[in-house]
Amino acid sequence: MPTSTTPAALPAATIVGYPRIGAARELKRAEEAYWAGRIDRAEFDSRTRELRRATRARLVELGLTGDAAVPETYSVYDQVLDAAATVGAVPARFADVVTGALDVDDLFTLARGDAEHPPLEMTKWFDTNYHYLVPEIGPDTAFGPALTQAVDLFREAREDGVTTRPVLVGPLTLLLLAKPADGAPEGFDPLDRLDDVVAAYAQVLAQLAEAGAPWVQLDEPGLVADQRVDAAALAQALQRSLRQLARSADRPRILVTTPYGGIGDLLPALLGTGVEAVHLDLTRGELPTVEQLAGVAGVQLVAGLVEGRSVWRTDLGTAAARLQELRDRVERAGGDPEAVGVGTSVSLQHVPHSLTAETALDPRLVETLAFADEKVAEVVRLAGGEVTPGAVDGPRSVVRDWEGVRNGSVWERQAALTDADLDRGPYAAREEAQQEVLQLPPLPTTTIGSFPQTDTIRTARAEHRAGRLDDDGYRAAMREEISQVIALQERLGLDVLVHGEAERNDMVQYFAENLDGFATTEHGWVQSYGSRCTRPSILFGDVSRPAPITVEWSQYAQSLTAKPVKGMLTGPVTILAWSFVRDDQPLGQTAQQVALALRDEVADLEAAGLRIVQVDEPALRELLPLRRADQPDYLRWSVDAFRLATGGAAVGTQVHTHLCYSEFNEVIDAIDGLDADVTSIESARSRGEVVEAIDPQRFDRGIGPGVWDIHSPRVPSQQEITELIERGEARIGARRLWVNPDCGLKTRAYAETEASLEHLVAAAKDARERIGVAAG
């Protein structure tokens, strides 16, 4: 149990987490410099410590004062990896390189792999664009304290004069997110190891108590989603795990958070576990009923009333009214209404640091926005009682009267749509027409779209943006890059080429900059995974396309080769998922507007001579609701949006799509419903497991399970790629199978890109010869 010196309550204002990359992406810069050998470990440690020191000081300055008000959510790469490493969950396949007490270099090895060790699989964190590393747990995995990061960071903060709240992904969620390790017996579930994992957590909590930590935060977002076990089994596992921790003889007080949705009827089970505080996401979840609050006596609640996943200002008057209602219900349930504090709904890692760095946004738009720092200030205001319940507290919604929000012609076009606009006719007829035009070999090879973004490309873009390079000079620089990329692909022997996307800063931002209804930021960086950061655009108004966007570059690329070049577009669902989207109309309606703009782009690409158009939807699975009852409506409008974007394409135009980290089996019917002629999908990091979800009798169109994991710097051998091709052949058949990387090559260097593609093409050619021999 907690020691007598532990404070009785959390401060009234706190947050679930905060961006860890740094306002100027200090973490990214330090990591990439360290990986490249430009700085040593001592310099890396110094830079990251300064980043953490600045973060803690900033949060105290914003009003998160008092012991344990500031959560210690720093991670050098990923919070799930941290939790797995903390309790020693290291796959046996790393046993020769990751041993004993773990440190930062071990985390990088697990996350990025090396020449002999493929990295841990990576997939999306709930319904966000953040990627976590998937733990691999088997019946023989040995658990016990192995990474001392949580204790080290607490002590470091104490040295800086701040008593923080250590944060770990909770034991139940860790196992719900894990996969069985290689060699695990049929039917094994990582949840089978719950008691062993909880025992390791108890040891870690004892270490934190010894270091003087008054509180620890255990994140259990697994409670807000429908899981592979039913609700009764989930409640039982929840109580078993947390009661065991609550009974520990020596531990800090425990705050359990439930971000990303509502836990509903699981709340009584959680309140009865013996933990001292429970956080509720009250932006995606409903206020709990008095009945659900049974057992709240003696438990502090943290009301997550400030949305941590959007950049819109909180309607503080409405939030204050909901806070008052929650306190009233807690009192009626026998609890202490004064023990209800205020927090964010989720970690603020999903939003940029601060609006203060943005100088180019329209002031009218800025009035409606709140980034991480502004959201912390909202939490402090609510907790301090500075807002009267129901009061009008300034603009919040994206509904505005100023010009540029409403576009009548877009609404008229939407109203005129019919089912015929989504239908390209039977696939058999399309396949015949496309093969006649394209004349592709068996197992055609291609890439997903982007090629490495070099310093030369970035410099040219920056010089053009700053006005130091005129339009003609910029166009010449991009054409030179495109010509080199086409020549490289010709030399390597790829069958379907791409122009490389040198002109694009980001696959969503590039389109946002060329569509009406969007705004883009200067410094609005958000972590996607590891050192990878994106700058989500802000979709605030009706979307339309004032002029062609990609046609010039794709048409030029096609003029350089007789081989087919793919026109490359980002799909409507992904543009929404990787932007901060207006909240005054249904997402499906906004997706339809984006789809219409893309439909016009497809038509212009066809008119320019492109015979293959790829519309990427890597985020299709990402936005899938966490509750199964809510999924059919989403899948309907998301599939319809893709089909609207591509539905005007001619029968002889081959339409591709790409999906990554999609947990293919969960959305296989929706992917089938997209009706793309060819679908490529991330597969290499899971070593081709995804192909087992594909029923070739149902999914009868082209499919390209990735054979090269581009999220790691390692070069796959030709043999590795051959094995993945053979696995795809065995399941799908050679007639439908394409050979391609997992994703775009933007983040890779040219040396590893060329070597990997050489192996990919050679493996495909060998497979064709083998198929020919078999046919003979």
Image (tube, rainbow, N blue to C red):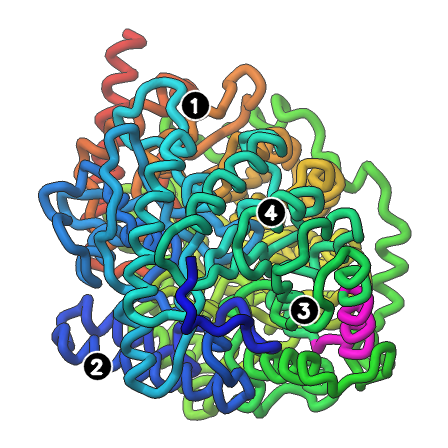
How many numbered badges does the structure rendering display? 4
Q: Are marks 3 and 1 in contact (CB under 8 Å)?
A: no
Magenta segment, which residues? 313-326
Percent position (x, y) of residue 731? 40, 18
Going by the image, does 614 lie left or right of 163?
right
Describe the element under mark 4 as helix, strand or loop. loop
Q: CA distance from mark 4 to mark 1?
A: 41 Å
**What secondary structure prevails in the magenta region?**
helix
Q: CA distance from mark 1 to mark 2?
A: 46 Å
Mark 2 highlights which residue? 46
Percent position (x, y) of residue 8? 53, 71
Q: CA distance from mark 2 to mark 4?
A: 43 Å
- Circle 1 packing at 10 Å, graded few (<14), some (14-19), many (20+), is some
Mark nearer the N terminus (3 vs 1): 3
Q: CA distance from mark 4 to mark 3?
A: 17 Å
Relative to residue 361, is residue 754 depicted above or below? above
Describe the element under mark 3 as helix, strand or loop. strand
Q: Quadrant of the C terminus?
A: top left
Relative to residue 709, is residue 252 depicted above or below? below
Mark nearer the N terminus (4 vs 3): 4
Q: Is residue 321 magenta?
A: yes
* Front position among marks 1 and 2: 2
Residue found 17% across the figure and 69% down from its top:
36
Percent position (x, y) of residue 517? 72, 72
Mark nearer the N terminus (2 vs 4): 2
Rendered image: mark on residue 272? 4
Mark 1 highlights which residue? 692
Q: Amino acid at mark 1?
A: Glu
Q: Amino acid at mark 3?
A: Val
